[in-house]
Amino acid sequence: MENETKVSTNYPNVISGIDTLFYFYQSNKLYDDFFSHLLEQLEVNKKRFDDANISYENRDLKASINNHVFEFNGRANGFYWFTHLDNFVKVGFKDSNSNPALHNIQVQLIGVGIYTLGLKSLLRYVDDIFTHISTGYKPVTRADLNMFVQSDLSWLNKEMFVSRKRKYTSHLKEICSKYKLQTLS
């Protein structure tokens, strides 16, 4: 019994997770028809408000995607952005003829969805919504991580943070005390 390995019951003082996950879906041959139908839904919604002489905001325009309702957020960076009504995911769709080097469907999993359903369940949930217009290939482009550490990190400074971008501006604010360091960027 001398060589018996003990299993530690001391867990590290670290809880980590993903607050936001960004990825693209590679679209399939049905995407162009889907995109046309999506724009048509927006136009029908706009016409309904205009005919009734009612003012509206982008979020008042809704679109149905595979029996799920999405609110229109507006256009940005060539994408038409929508948020699922449960606020678990934001999705951007672009015209497949514009910027062909970029995938047509951009997805952002939001923290409230990740923490409510769990990352794996939320990924399956979103996959089920877009399975009819995607090949299943989905490269991850960004993950916003969080970590809570019960340790003295006062030795950290802003020179230790690195960006892989060609040009960037660091707006880093440090909040320090004897026992903790917080960075806001």
Image (cartoon, rainbow, N blue to C red):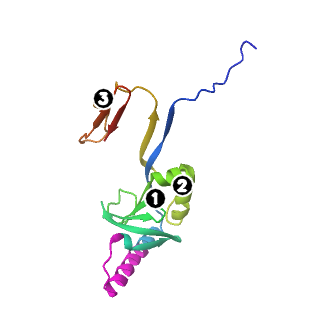
Q: Which residue is mark 2?
A: 122
Q: Give the residue drawn at x 45%, y 36%.
A: 148
Q: Give the residue drawn at x 32%, y 72%.
A: 57
Magenta: main secondary structure: helix
Q: Give the residue drawn at x 76%, y 14%.
A: 1
> Identity of the amino acid at label 3?
Asn
Q: Residues within 10 Å of mark 2 (few under 14, many from 20)?
A: some
Tell me the CA gap for discs 3 and 1: 34 Å
Q: Against 61, is 13 above or below?
A: above
The nearer-to-camera label among 2 and 3 is: 3
Q: Earlier in the sequence, mark 2 or mark 3?
A: 2
Q: Secondary structure at mark 2?
A: helix
Residue 138 seen by the camera:
no
Tell me the CA gap for discs 2 and 3: 35 Å
Q: Which residue is mark 3?
A: 157
The region drawn magenta spans: 36-58
Q: Position of residue 96 (x, y in %)?
A: 37, 65
Q: Which residue is mark 1?
A: 89
Q: Earlier in the sequence, mark 2 or mark 1?
A: 1
Q: Position of residue 169 (x, y in %)?
A: 23, 41
Pick the front one: 14 or 39: 14
